[in-house]
Amino acid sequence: MKIFVARLMGVVLSLLAVLIGLIPAWVFLGVRALAEPEGFWQELALGLVGMFFLGAMQLIFLVGLAIMLAWIWSETEDDVDIIRREQRQMS
């Protein structure tokens, strides 16, 4: 049961990390929905601003996300190994 909880915690933390890592995408989608661009030039302007500013932020956040997920899952596997050792010692 402890192993299940440890892995479940890893999944929950991973989902939280993904939500945080995708903040620029959520911002872009929200701004685009509120702005409701009409016509070629408005679409182009909003797309360029979104790609230039939020695209750079998204790239940085995705690198951070990859690092965070690697750390979360390495910690989760370490916790699982510790729990397994404790269970072996108890039996």
Image (cartoon, grey):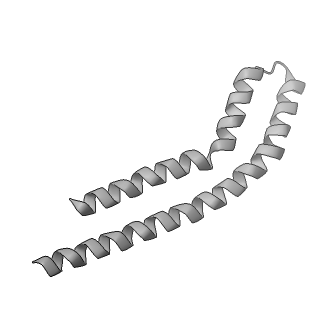
Q: Quadrant of residue 25?
A: top right
Left or right, 76 with reference to 58 = left
The residue at the point 55 percent across, 62 percent down is 68
The residue at the point 78 percent across, 51 percent down is 56
| 69, 1: nearer the viewer | 1
Q: Quadrant of residue 34?
A: top right
The residue positioned farthest toward the bottom in the image shown: 89
The residue at the point 85 percent across, 20 percent down is 39
The residue positioned farthest toward the left in the image shown: 91
The x, y position of residue 43, in whole percent, is 82, 28
Q: Is residue 26 above or below residue 55?
A: above
The total number of labels drawn is 0
Left or right, 5 with reference to 69 = left
Q: Is residue 6 above or below residue 23?
A: below
| 51, 70: nearer the viewer | 70
Quadrant of the frame with the N terminus: bottom left
The residue at the point 68 percent across, 32 percent down is 29
The x, y position of residue 17, in whole percent, is 54, 52
| 35, 72: nearer the viewer | 72
Left or right, 58 with reference to 73 = right
The x, y position of residue 87, in whole percent, is 18, 74
The residue positioned farthest toward the right in the image shown: 41
Quadrant of the frame with the C terminus: bottom left
Left or right, 17 with reference to 1 = right
